[in-house]
Every structure is written in C-alpha cells, then in structure tokens.
Image (spheres, grey):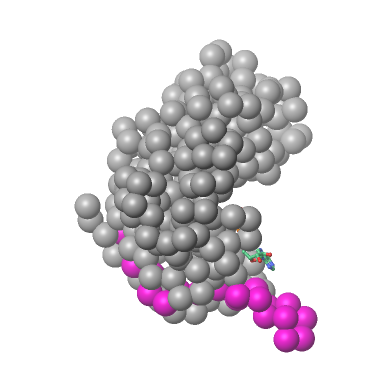
C-alpha cells in the first residue's frame, strides 16, 4: 500500500494558563497508508481525537504541534479532502436547517456545483447511506430523525466533499447495538468501494478488530503498539493492550 503520511516524533500540547501546558500526544511514530482502515484505540483521554484533529489541521489555536507530519502529496483540506463523522451527529448538522440543505452546501462548496446539481447529488448521497425516501429525509430537520438516521445523514455530509480520508470518531457509541453494526458495515463498505482511507477512533478494541486492517493502541498520549488485528488480539506485545483485551473478555468478547 502506498504511504499517505508519516508521523515522526509527533506531539501536541494544549497550552493552558501558567505552566499548565498539557501533553496530549507525545513521540508518535506512525505511518498511515492510502486506502487502509486504521483504527485508533485507547482509553478516554489517550490522545486519539487530538491525533485526528491534527491530521485534519483542525486543532484549536491553543494547541502546539511538534515533531513532523509529512504528507506524501499536498496537505489535505479539511471538509474536502478529509471528512469527519463524530460521536454526536448533531455537532455536524445545523439544527435549524433541513439536513438536505446542509449536505448540499458542502457539495456546492467542495465539488463546485450549482444549487440544482448539488441537491440532486445530495439525494444520491442520502441513498448511498441507505436512507429510504431521500426526498423526505432531505426536507427533515435533525430533531425529526432517529439517532441512527442522523448518523447516516452525518456520514452523507462527510462524504459530500468527496474526501480521500474519512475520520470516524466514535461514530456509533451513541447508538444501540443493532444500529451500530449497520452503521459500521455501511462505513466499511462505502470506504472500500471508494478506495478511501478510513481512520476509525474507538475505545472498543473488539469492535475494530472485526474490520480494521491495522489497530494503533494509544495510552496517555503515546502510541503503545500498532499491528494487524490478529497481531494485536492474539499476540499483543504490550501489557496495556492485553489489559484492553481482557477488559472486553470480561464483558463477553
Ligand atoms: N481543546 C482542548 N484543550 C485542552 N486540552 C484538551 C483539549 N482537547 C483535549 N485535551 C486534552 O488532551 C488529552 C487527550 O484528549 P483527546 O480528546 O485527544 O483523547 P481521546 O483519546 O480522544 O479521548 P476520548 O476517548 O475521551 O474522546 C486529554 O488529557 C484532554 O483533556
């Protein structure tokens, strides 16, 4: 697989008041490959979201980056080259606009289309994320949709810019198990078909081992280990990874 990006000694610190400059990521060496499904796992606060935001150049202004992040091609544009799906789909949908308008705006801006074409492409996107009756969904406001429908709409909005990379940050943790499985299957098949790189953030190592090409395990801002699901699940090299797996076995994995 072609290399997309190389991180070397990469880190991020959020600068607070006084000496409170907290290291959210530290000394990360990681290669990301074009078209792979890379899962970032680790407990809350381990730096997964910080890494995703850094990749998309979306870190807040009080964050300081160090080390190197070298893209093979030109640095991607957030919203266009990189699409984001968050845990709470409400965050990427405007509560006072029909969802179709939100998606169509992304199509207009990033695919340079006129209004009419953008709306037609929006209906196609809603169909691709397997929402029945796209016309009706496009006219709906976010609060009129179920959690699973909202997450599919958020996925359509993330795909609207025709991204090369899709970052999904705990996209299913607010959904029930059945809907969760369907949304994951959808993300997986859409990214595979499009040859898109998927960066999937989760604290659930069992969940990601079902579909990821590689799993990167983070703890306290450091990359603990990275490998294929077989390597990570059946031959973890680090005690922390074993602990994450045991924690899942304890609840029936
Ligand atoms: N905007 C911010 N300003 C200051 N500190 C932050 C900010 N965002 C994150 N942090 C801190 O950086 C560290 C890493 O947080 P991050 O959100 O990247 O972790 P995470 O692994 O994605 O966690 P979670 O699974 O809970 O989303 C944490 O200590 C967090 O408190």
Q: Image height check: is 65 above or below 77? A: below
Compared to 31, does 198 lie above or below? above
User: Which residue is at the far top?
Assistant: 133
Residue at image position (50%, 59%) is 240
In the rendered view, does 82 fall on the left or right side of 19? left
Q: Position of residue 109 (x, y in %)?
A: 51, 45
Question: Farthest left residue?
Answer: 1
Confirm whether the magenta stretch covers residue 189. no
For ligand 1, the image quadrant comes to bottom right
Which residue is painted at 52% across and 53% down in the image? 243
From the viewer's perspective, tell me whether residue 122 is left or right of residue 38. Answer: right
Residue 42: where, in percent of width, then height?
54, 55
With 241 as the anchor, is 147 left or right in this view?
right
Horizontal side, residue 239 vs residue 44: left or right: left
Is the residue 214 above or below the residue 53 in the image?
A: above
**In x, y percent, where is residue 247?**
56, 46
Q: Main secondary structure of the magenta part?
A: strand
Between 124 and 229, the residue placed more toward the observer is: 229
Q: Residue at x 54, y 33 (%)?
A: 252
Magenta stretch: give its range. 4-23
Q: Quadrant of residue 141?
A: top right
**Residue 228 seen from this side:** yes
């Amino acid at each position: 697989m072609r290399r997309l990006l190389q991180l070397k000694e990469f880190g991020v610190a959020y600068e607070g008041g006084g000496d409170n400059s907290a290291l959210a990521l530290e000394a990360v060496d990681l290669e990301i490959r074009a078209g792979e499904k890379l899962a970032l796992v680790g407990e809350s606060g381990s730096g997964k979201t910080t890494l995703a935001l850094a990749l998309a150049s979306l870190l807040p202004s009080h964050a300081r980056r160090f080390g190197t992040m070298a893209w093979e091609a030109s640095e991607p544009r957030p919203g266009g080259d990189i699409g984001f799906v968050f845990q709470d789909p409400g965050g990427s949908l405007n509560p006072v606009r029909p969802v179709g308008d939100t998606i169509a705006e992304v199509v207009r801006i990033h695919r340079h289309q006129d209004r009419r074409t953008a709306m037609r492409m929006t209906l196609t996107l809603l169909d691709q994320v397997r929402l029945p009756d796209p016309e009706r969904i496009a006219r709906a406001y976010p609060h009129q949709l179920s959690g699973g429908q909202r997450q599919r709409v958020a996925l359509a909005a993330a795909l609207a810019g025709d991204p090369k990379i899709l970052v999904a940050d705990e996209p299913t943790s607010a959904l029930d198990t059945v809907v969760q499985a369907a949304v994951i299957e959808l993300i997986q098949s859409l990214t595979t078909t499009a040859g898109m790189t998927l960066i999937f953030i989760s604290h659930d190592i069992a969940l990601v081992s079902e579909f990821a090409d590689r799993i990167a395990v983070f703890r306290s801002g450091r990359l603990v280990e990275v490998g294929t699901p077989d390597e990570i699940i059946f031959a973890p090299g680090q005690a922390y990874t074993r602990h994450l797996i045991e924690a899942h076995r304890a609840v029936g994995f």
